[in-house]
Image (cartoon, rainbow, N blue to C red):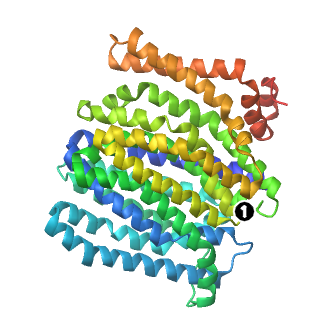
């Protein structure tokens, strides 16, 4: 199978797995959000922020370094394995023996115990990072998908049962630990890589030359994304961070379903075009164009009905979270251009530029988060959306440095879907607020979703036909011949 065919196949398997995994986790999330108070829910969400930041150190950019290499070397990979494992164990012990006692003494006992329990996942992920990198490098996303679906469904069922039987915040903790440990064990067995008793400082230095900048950029991205939430949890309390996290959850779901699988497989494709600057630039524009056709209507569509979506899914106690979601969804223009930015820069061997754009974005998030904090969770979400648009021109200038693609080319590539989705957002919002405001919640939501789908499709086919045709032309070779014939505008 060609590289493009393997990319399409891997993407489909990754998307399919994400659908099942995220549906299972969303079901658990909804049950817990309806059972737990915003304060209880926020306590666990606050602990998970510190686990996410620690996880960046555990991976340390090493899997990306292994995937990018032209050939796979088990000895080289063994050095990476022992490095990841040592970092994971060290960080887990550091949290349990250093941070947790201080948290229990000066902040909250339950929060400290939750943080200690979740630190076990850092050890597990350190032990399996290289195995998963091997599977991803070989485009074996089918194996990752099939194994992951079963284990995530099991862990979700465990979480729901525990929540319904009164385990409270521990239902989330136990469910997460079960999911990570079971998935990691299965993928370890599925991977052909087995660590050897080998460790080389020379190889570690080679890994560090590439992964150091990747680690820095990933850490900055995580810190920039998480620091506003840390400010909320520290200064306004767990209830505020609970509203913020519940509002962000639908958007995270969509991102995990559509964007993350594409990013995962795009790393392997882009790394194989690293030697050809022009080819790499074209790959970036094609990826962003295809992504925009999906991301723009989905994000703008959710923004138009966000208060209704949150109330229906999580309950009336999460009203503020609905407006957090609205503010976050309006980031779609900047994020669509940025989703494949880091994979492209890394593939070009310019991890220094990845670090630079992450630094600018993170500093902007901190400044924006502090400013928005005075307006609560909604203010923080709005400030981050504004920041993303303000710093995107700088990020596009770095893409031009690495690939030659001008900012005007990149923006023009998504302008059709963006404009169609923006018009759809305005019309659906007007309809929801002024024409359907007296309708029952479920009926209003269903009518708005149907109207949004029709409006976007009509606008794309009538006004932005070129963008729609470009994406369909990309997937046409992988459709059955008789199906291709029915699409008259596919060449």
Q: Nearer the viewer, residue 220 or 163?
A: 220
Give how far across and how far down residue 365 sits, in percent: 44, 51
Which quadrant would residue 30 be assigned to in this image? Answer: top left
Q: Is residue 80 left or right of residue 103?
A: right
Which secondary structure lies at badge 1? loop
Q: Is residue 467 above or below residue 36?
A: above
Q: Nearer the viewer, residue 359 or 52?
A: 359
Give how far across and how far down residue 284 sits, in percent: 71, 49
Residue at 46% from the left image edge and 56% from the top image edge: 363
Which quadrant would residue 429 be assigned to in this image? Answer: top left
Q: Is residue 140 visible?
A: yes
Q: Quadrant of the N terminus?
A: bottom right
Give how far across and how far down residue 228 sits, in percent: 36, 51
Q: Is residue 161 above or below residue 67?
A: above
Q: Quadrant of the C terminus?
A: top right
Residue at 58% from the left image edge and 83% from the top image edge: 78
Q: Nearer the viewer, residue 421 or 399?
A: 399
Tell me the crowding category of disc 1: few under 14, some 14 to 19, or many 20 or more residues within 10 angstroms, Cα based.
many
Q: Nearer the viewer, residue 113 or 330?
A: 330
Give how far across and how far down residue 436 sits, in percent: 39, 11
Residue at 42% from the left image edge and 25% from the top image edge: 305
Quickly name the residue at label 1. 348
């Amino acid at each position: 199978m060609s590289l493009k065919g393997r990319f399409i196949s891997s993407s489909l398997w990754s998307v399919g797995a994400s659908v099942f995994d995220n549906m299972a986790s969303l079901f658990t999330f909804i049950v817990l959000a309806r059972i737990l108070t915003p304060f209880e829910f926020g306590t666990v969400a606050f602990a998970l922020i510190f686990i996410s930041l620690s996880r960046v150190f555990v991976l340390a950019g090493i899997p990306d370094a292994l995937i990018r290499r032209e050939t796979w070397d088990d000895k080289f990979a063994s050095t990476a394995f022992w490095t990841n494992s040592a970092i994971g164990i060290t960080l887990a012990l550091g949290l349990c023996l250093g941070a947790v006692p201080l948290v229990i003494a000066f902040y909250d006992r339950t929060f400290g115990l939750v943080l200690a329990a979740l630190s076990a996942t850092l050890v597990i992920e350190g032990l399996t990072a290289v195995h998963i990198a091997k599977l991803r490098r070989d485009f074996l996303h089918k194996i990752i998908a099939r194994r992951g679906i079963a284990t995530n469904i099991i862990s979700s069922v465990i979480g729901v049962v525990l929540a319904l039987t009164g385990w409270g915040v521990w239902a989330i903790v136990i469910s997460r630990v079960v999911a990570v440990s079971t998935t990691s064990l299965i993928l370890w067995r599925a991977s052909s890589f087995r660590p050897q008793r080998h460790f080389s400082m020379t190889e570690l230095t080679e890994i560090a030359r590439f992964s150091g900048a990747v680690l820095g950029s990933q850490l900055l991205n995580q810190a920039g994304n998480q620091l506003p939430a840390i400010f909320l949890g520290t200064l306004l309390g767990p209830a505020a961070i609970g509203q913020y996290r519940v509002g962000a959850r639908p958007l995270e779901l969509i991102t995990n379903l559509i964007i993350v699988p594409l990013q995962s497989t795009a790393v392997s494709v882009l790394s194989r075009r690293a030697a050809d600057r022009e080819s790499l630039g074209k790959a970036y524009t094609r990826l962003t164009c295809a992504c925009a056709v999906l991301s723009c209507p989905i994000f703008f569509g959710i923004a138009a009905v966000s208060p209704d979506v949150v109330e229906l899914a999580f309950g009336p106690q999460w009203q503020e979270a609905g407006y957090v979601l609205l503010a976050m969804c309006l980031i779609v223009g900047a994020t669509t251009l940025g989703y494949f930015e880091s994979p492209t820069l890394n593939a070009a061997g310019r991890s220094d530029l990845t670090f630079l754009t992450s630094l600018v974005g993170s500093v902007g998030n901190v400044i924006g988060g502090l400013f928005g904090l005075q307006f609560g969770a909604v203010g923080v979400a709005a400030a981050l959306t504004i920041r993303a648009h303000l710093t995107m021109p700088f990020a596009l200038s770095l893409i031009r440095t690495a690939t030659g693609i001008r900012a005007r080319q990149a923006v023009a590539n998504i302008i059709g879907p963006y404009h169609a989705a923006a018009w759809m957002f305005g019309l659906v919002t007007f309809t929801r607020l002024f024409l359907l405001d007296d309708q029952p919640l479920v009926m209003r939501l269903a009518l708005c979703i149907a109207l949004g789908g029709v409006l976007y499709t009509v606008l794309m086919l009538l006004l932005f036909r070129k963008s729609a045709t470009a994406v369909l032309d990309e997937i046409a070779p992988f459709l059955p011949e008789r199906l291709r014939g029915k699409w008259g505008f596919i060449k």
